[in-house]
Structure formats: structure tokens, C-alpha cells
Amino acid sequence: MEFEAVIGLEVHAELLTESKIFCSCTTEFGGEPNTHCCPVCLGLPGTLPVLNKKAVEYAIRAGLALNCNIARFSKMDRKNYFYPDLPKAYQISQYDLPLCRDGYVEIETEDGIKKIGIIRVHLEEDAGKLIHEENGGSSLVDYNRTGVPLIEIVSYPDMRTPEEARLYLTKLKSILEYTEVSDCKMQEGSLRVDTNISVRPVGSDTFGTKVELKNLNSFRAVYKALEYEFKRQAEAIKNGEEITQETRRWDENKGITISMRSKEEAHDYRYFPEPDIVPIVVGDEWIEEIRSNIPELPHQKKERFIKDLGLPAYDAGVITADKALSDFFEKCVELYDNPKTISNWVMGEILRGMKEAEIEASSLPISPEQLVMLQKMVDAGTISISIGKKVFDTMLKTGKNPNDIVEEEGLAQISDEGSLRSTVLKVIENNPKSVEDFLGGKEKAMGFLIGQVMKETKGKANPQMINEIMKEELSKLSKN
Amino acid sequence: MELYEYSVYELISILEKGETNSVEVTESIIENIDKRDGDIGAFLYVDKEGALKAAEEADRLRRDGKSAPFLGIPVAIKDNICTEGTKTTCASKMLENFVPPYDATVVKKLKEAGAIIVGKTNMDEFAMGSSTENSALKKTVNPWDFDRVPGGSSGGSAAAVAASEVPVALGSDTGGSIRQPASFCGVVGLKPTYGRVSRYGLVAFASSLDQIGPFARDVEDAAMLLNVIAGYDKMDSTSVPGRENYFLDGIKDGIKGFKIGLPKEYYGEGVSSDVRESVLAMVKRLEGLGAFVEETSLPYSEYALAAYYIISSAEASSNLARYDGIRYGHRADKFDDLIDLYARSRSEGFGKEVKRRIMLGTYVLSSGYYDAYYKKALKVRTLIKNDFDRAFEKYDVLISPTSPTVAFKFGEKSNPLEMYLADILTVPVNIAGLPAISVPCGLAGGLPVGLQVIGKPFDEKTLLKIAYAVQENTGKLKPEVK
Ligand SMILES: [Zn+2]
């Protein structure tokens, strides 16, 4: 029997508002613990929350970009539970009347475009952070994050493979980044993902028992955990075992999921309407105003890159999937009028460099100005393209300017004809066998000889010139 | 007559004429508190030093030609209203040492109006109770009879005003906590329309019902204090903008032509006959003054008490969850783990009644019970509101007794349900978010009887007019404090 996964995702994204959702404290990340707090976000007795209109606006903007219906009437509710990072012992969230409903996101799978449905997008407040002391047995709480506005985006269980889940997340992240709703930094916790997965025989239209997965700190972790969980559940079903409805934790080091709590242990959050905040009433005019101010979305940018810049569809797709990367690309193109050349750098060296150094496009140590400077040195013949790639690696590690690197490491291309000719003659003299082969009709031997010249010059020789000189000298020999 | 016996408008008059100054007034008040409060127990904290300093400052401002509506007037504050730098305990062990770093909006407004904060008054713990017997910190007696309760939960504020320890005070009213003690102590107590006064800085009991309001020895003073504290506040999104009024205007214009409804359910079983007679006698006199009086009905009021205890306890269970011993408030000395820390801190910090309401509230919100209790209570709330809306199509105000009885004795209401019934005539008003005032209308067995006037939303002016007429026909009542 063949199995398929049924996957749904719950994504929390912190909104990029300047102040918190119910008070005027800053939302800035970091800062000394408990310095971005006031009586309101600390939930001191007698304080009251006042809803930040910007947070509502950002949530609506996200909802519109995700093709949702915006509720003209919604309200906040209290979700009650005790935890030290939650100073009021309830989280102000939305329960039965979320701000946005019934949207979708399109992903590009191998089988074509697929719509992933979105059940709801609702607004809520973030909690603080617990810091457990290594040895001492006590815990500290930092309330800086308390009251930072969040949206929770709940998808329909429309994904059938871990890969589809990854594509959905990538698309969602890029939409939230493009609309400037969230900066989506998973390592700073401004994007958090929970997922649920059940497994069923292919062709079945009923759902299996759902398992929730937590502690997923990267898209890769989401992918790996889903992959693991799919295998685990499929195996269990094959062996006739019952799947337990539970929450499981992804152990990154061991690469497995571990049971956290069963359904019976699930919280009763005792939701009820938040009496301190009046219902949110949204007029058509405001929605249209927000809609008209939505920045360019990834698919729109992709089309523009294909149409206006002449990029291949594939390149345009990859580059626009990442907002920071596409911004980098565009800045380069402003400075250098050959989009395809820039695209080659981005698709090649930059993506490889990001992957190897495990960095995001937003934190690339190379500026668009530096990359353009490097390309211009190649164009001018100061360095070859292959030396250029080496210089790029050094730039990635050090952030230095390419001209400084070329100078410090003496990488400038040798274009002096006299010196190149003497190296060519030296190589011919030292490799009589290859010369003989070439003269005997083996064209390939030429490549070897040129390689030897490159070796002698440590790759700095101007390749076009060596080519010509080598041909010239060899033809002299053949005439003899 | 001693300075401490003066009403606010009398004090303002002699202060403005320069016949006295705020320091003299404040000294007189503090002296009287020193003399009487040992017996009465109205205050949890008296800020002598701060009050005198504020009085000196008020006098200096007055000498400089400055004026403000309450310049140099002493005021007492119920201890669930936050005062920056001064303990705000809610009469609970849980907050025995809690010092808020900010003023409630009403306190801020009072200070801006030049008022002198004399101290903080006793109450039922977290405003849950009808006799102030639930205070974990102090016993307050009724100045009319020391064997009787002052009512609650704002018993301290009511007793302080009744005993002339302070001319006016602030209380809070969730289900009758201003009106019922005002009735028991023979003073005026006003519960404004929900949204009229900012709740910012009022330690929440039941957020959708709580409202801060004034206590005074006469209707004019209540109106003047309401002038100071009313108004939209951007810190409280449930406060209503654009509703500012000057409440003293036309208060003495008479009540000719006003239509008064007497909801029959508020005069029925459970209301003692002497209270009923006292109120009806006053209604007769109002009729004599030209008011139109008619019996009417609010059929759903019968269910108000049940709905009230469900809604208020549900909100309280959530509002009081923050007292967990982690950041401030009482923390148990010994505990095994986090859950144990919560359980012990809360078991030790809260009194019996508070725990009862938290358990009740938690229960009615629990999955499986929510629809049967909380949701149904919200439906009843709508029906009660509709009842009132219908009545107000016909009448300007409704009149009833404030409390079914006069002040009862300590320990008399031994089971909680009996105690809850003390609020049966006041809770429907909170459920519907309406304004209501309790004004003394006579004595029964030597104890004051309160008459409740219920008005349309944001029509406190009419309430005050009617209440003034009642006051004019009652004569001032004053306890003989030994
Ligand atoms: Zn804050």
C-alpha cells in the first residue's frame, strides 16, 4: 500500500509595527532584558490594553496579500493559561471572529501551480521569553517581546508532501516580506512554524489521526521533521498500529520526533470575549486604502524581471522568491546595465555562498556596489572571470573591496605580451611530448599546454592572449 | 460646625473668600480621622504628610491667583484605585505590599483639579462582597451602628464620608458596590454609565461591569466630583468620547413633568416592608412635586443576579490570574516547582470569597460548560438591556430601593447566597451598563434607607436632579458618631 501525507501549517509572524500591540513600547529586537516594557505590557493591576491601529492595518494587509476576505466586524478574545512569560496569565488573541478568512497561496510544484488554502489569519500578542539558567535551577524572564503584535496564519491541510510544505513556507515568507508585514527572521523568532501531519493510503479521502509537531527552528527542520514523521506514521499504519493524537517535539540533533503531550493533556484555554477592547469594525474604504498601498508582490516582480529585464523565467523565479535577494539584484542592475550578467553572479556565486556560509540574503557581507566593482574589473581585463570568482570568495569572508583584494594578493591579470610569450615558450620546451601530440593532430593537447601556462602564472594570465600566443608559437613549430 | 463637616461646595466658597485655607481644612480632617477612625476603620492608609504638603501647595497656588475645580479639597480613594508611590492593596494579602508606579486616570484628574488625596479606604477583598467583611486587612463598621456592616464592597469610602472623615470619596461599583454601602451609611453614591469614567488604574474585578464613581454627603458634591473624574480617556478604549457634561447645571430646577417608573419586581418579596414603605413615601412626595409616577415591569430582572454572578466571576477568574507570585504580590516561601509556586502563592494570598469566585468563573468558562452558563448569561444580559430600553421609551427614570434591607449585623449573612441577595436590586443596572444613584430617603429603625434612581445611558444629569429633589425632601441625615 502506498501512503500520502496530509499536512497543515500554523505560522506565527511578528508584525513590523514600531510599537507594541497594546502600548507604546518599542518592538525592536534585542535590547537589555526588560527594558522595552511598561505597566501595560507587564499587565500590572489596573492597566488596560488599547489596540494599536497599525497592527490591525498590517494584519489586513497580510490578509489581502494572501487573498483573504477581511471581516468587517471582528473582536479580540482572551486565551487563558498560566506561564511565567505571560504576565496577565492570558493572551489577547482572536477566537471565533478572526480578522481575515478563506485565502490561499499559490505554489509551483513539479506538477504545476497548486493552491494552498488559508483558513484564517488572526491578530494576537506575543509572550515574553524564559531564560533557563544552566545550573542554579532558576529561570529568568525577559518581557521585551511581550505584546509584540503577531499574526497567526492557519492553512488548510492541503499539502501532501514535505516538499509542498517547504514551498508553501517559502512563498508565505516572501509574501510577508514583500508586503513589509514581517521581517520573517526565524533565528530571531519573528517567524515561527508549527505543523500537523496525518498519513493515509493514497486515494483515500478520509483523514488519519493528526499529530502536531513543535520546535521547528528552520524551514529545513520543518522539512526534515515532516519527512521523519511521514515515515514513522506510515510504518506504524503498515504494522497495524494506532496513531495517537498528540503533540510531538522535533529533536534536531537526533533527527527524530518525541512525544510531548497527548490530547487528554491538552489545555482548556477558556476563551471568552476580551471585555477591555471594543470590537474591531473595519470599513470598506479603509480596506481599499490598504489594498492600494500594498507593495509589489513576488509574482508581480517576477513578471517584471522577465518582461523588463529579460531574465529567464527560472532565474526570475529564484531571485524574486527571496525579497532581500531580489532587492540586492535590483540595486546591482541600477549600477550595471546588464541584468543577465548580474543574474549569473546571483544564481551562481551568491546563492552558493549563502548556502555554504548559512547566511540570509539580508545579511550578505557584500554590497551591490562591491559586486558591480568586481564585474567591472573583469570587464576591464584586470582579472579573469575565474580569478573573479576567487576574489568573490574572499569578499564574502572579509567584506573587503575587490580592488583591495586583487592588489593585496597580486591577482591582477598578466597581459604583458613579452612576459606571457616567454612563459609559453618555457612550457613548450618543458613538454615536448604534448607538443608532439598536438603536432600529430591531437587538438586536446593544446588545452593541457594552456593549463600549464595558467599554472605557471598562478591563473593570472590573460586567457585570450595565451590562447593566441600559444597558437602562434605552435604553428611556427609545425611549419618547421 | 467644624471644618471637617463642611461639604465640598461650602469649602470651596470659604476657601475662595479666604475665610480658611487648605492646610486648616486638611488638619481638621486629619484630626477627625485620628479621633474616629480607630473605631470606624474606614482607612487602610492615611497619608498625613503627603496630604498636608499638597494642602500647602494648594494654598500657594490660590495665593498666586490660580484656580482649579477641587483646589485644596480633601478626597479619599478606594484601595483598588492605583495611586503612584502609595500602596494599593485591594484589601488583599495578595497585594498587601503592592505599590503601583502610576496613577489611575481618575487620580490623575483629581490631582490636576487640585484635590488632596488623604488616604486609601477599606473594601471587600478585590471588591468582592457586600459588607466589607471580606477585607483581609481591616474591619470597617457602620458609623450609624458599630455592630452593623457599612455595606460593600466600597464600605470604607462610604463609612469615611458618613463619619465626616472626608467630604467625598471614590468607590467602584461592579454590582452595587457604591450604591449599597451608600444606602447603608446614609450617603449619596453614584454609579456612572459604563464608559463615562475611565477604568484605567482601577484594579479589575469584572471589566465589563466595573465603573468608578463618587460618594458624598450631598448630591451637589457627588455631581461636582463626577465633573472632575468623567470623560474619555485614550488609555481606556471602553471609555466613551464626546460625552462631557457639567453635572451641576440645572440640578435644582425641579422635577415637574418627569416620568418615573416603579418596576414592580423591585418592590416584591425579599424587600423588607419598612424599606419599601420609606421609598414609596418619598415617591409620593415626588409625585406631589409634579412628577408622573407609574408602576412598570422589568420581567427579566429576576435572572439578573444569576447572570451577574456568572459574568462577573468569569471575568474575575481571568483578571485575577495575573496574581501568580512571579513578578509582584504575595509569593509563597516554600514551593517544589512552578505549579506548586502558583498554587501555594494563590492559596495563601487570596481569601475565601475571592477563591470561590475564581473557581466559579473558571468553571463557567470551561469547555463543555461555556454554552450552558457563560453564553446563556450573555443572552440574559441582552434581554435585561432590552427590558430597560423598553422602560426608558416611556420613563425618564426608574426608582426602587437600593438594597432590600437596611444595614445588617456583622456575621448575619452566613452563607454566600444570602450575601449575594443583598445586591439583587443593584446588579441589573451594571448588567445593562446604566447610571444609577443611591440617595438617602429616610430612616427605618434608626438606620438610613437608600433610594435608587436608575437613568438612561449618559443621563446622569436627570438622576442628579431627581436625587436632589429627594435630598431636599429628606433633610440631611447624619449619624451620631460616639
Ligand atoms: Zn509596554
Image (cartoon, coloured by chain):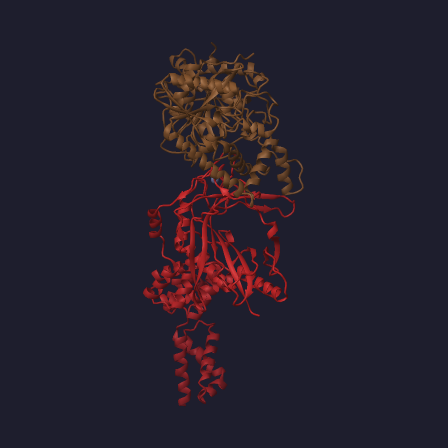
Chain colours: A red, B brown
Residue B59 appears in the picture as rendered: no
Residue B39, image quadrant? top right
In terms of depth relative to the viewer, which is nearer, A465 or A76? Answer: A76
Q: Nearer the viewer, residue B283 or B32?
A: B283
Please tell me which residue lies in front, A407 or B170. Answer: B170
Q: Position of residue A314 (x, y in %)?
A: 40, 68
Q: Is residue B471 above or below residue A188?
A: above
A442 vs B259: above or below: below
Residue at the limit of the structure toward the top, as seen here: B1
- In the picture, the quarter occupied by the N terminus of chain A is bottom right
Q: Percent x, y for residue A458?
A: 47, 72
For the point 45% across and 77% down, the residue is: A423
> Along the line of sight, which residue is nearer the eye, B470 or A151?
B470
Report the number of numbered marks.
Answer: 0
Q: Is residue A67 visible?
A: yes
Residue that appears at 49% across and 83% down: A431
Which quadrant of the figure contains the C terminus of chain A? bottom left
Looking at the rendering, which quadrant does residue A68 occupy?
A: bottom left
Q: Where residue B273 sits: x, y (%)?
A: 52, 20
Residue A263: horizontal and vertical position, in percent? 59, 52
